Amino acid sequence: GVAEYAQRRQVTTFSPSLAARIELAFQVVDEAADPEQASERIYQLIGAGVSTIESVPAALAMVQLA
């Protein structure tokens, strides 16, 4: 996907894969019993900070949840 391509093209630090974190966020939403559980698990597993590595997967998960 786009995230994987962008990460391959950039010289990055030792941060986690953005594409993998997006996939994990979608998986968390799919496996959650309800929106409240999904939101809590996204917060605990992905994070909700301002850095791209947290904010992008969390935001996309919330869109999927809606």
Image (cartoon, grey):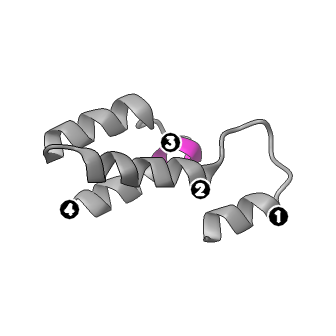
Residue 51 in which image quadrant: top right
What residue range appears in magenta? 52-56
Residue for badge 1: 9
Three-letter residue code for mark 4: Ala
Residue for badge 2: 19
Magenta-colored segment: predominant secondary structure:
helix
Which residue is painted at 39% across and 59% down in the image? 60
> In the rendered image of this protein, does residue 55 appear above or below residue 3?
above
Which residue is painted at 13% across and 45% down in the image? 34
Residue for badge 4: 66
Q: Quadrant of the C terminus?
A: bottom left
Three-letter residue code for mark 2: Ala
Three-letter residue code for mark 3: Glu
Query: Which secondary structure lies at badge 4?
Result: loop
Q: Do the residues labelled 1 and 3 touch (CB within 8 Å)?
A: no
Q: Which of marks 2 and 1 is nearer the N terminus?
A: 1
Query: Which secondary structure lies at badge 2?
Result: helix
Q: Position of residue 62 (x, y in %)?
A: 30, 54
Which residue is painted at 66% across and 40% down in the image? 16
Q: Distance between the residues labelled 3 and 4?
A: 19 Å
State the mark number for residue 54.
3
Q: Distance between the residues labelled 2 and 1?
A: 13 Å
Q: Position of residue 36 (x, y in %)?
A: 15, 40
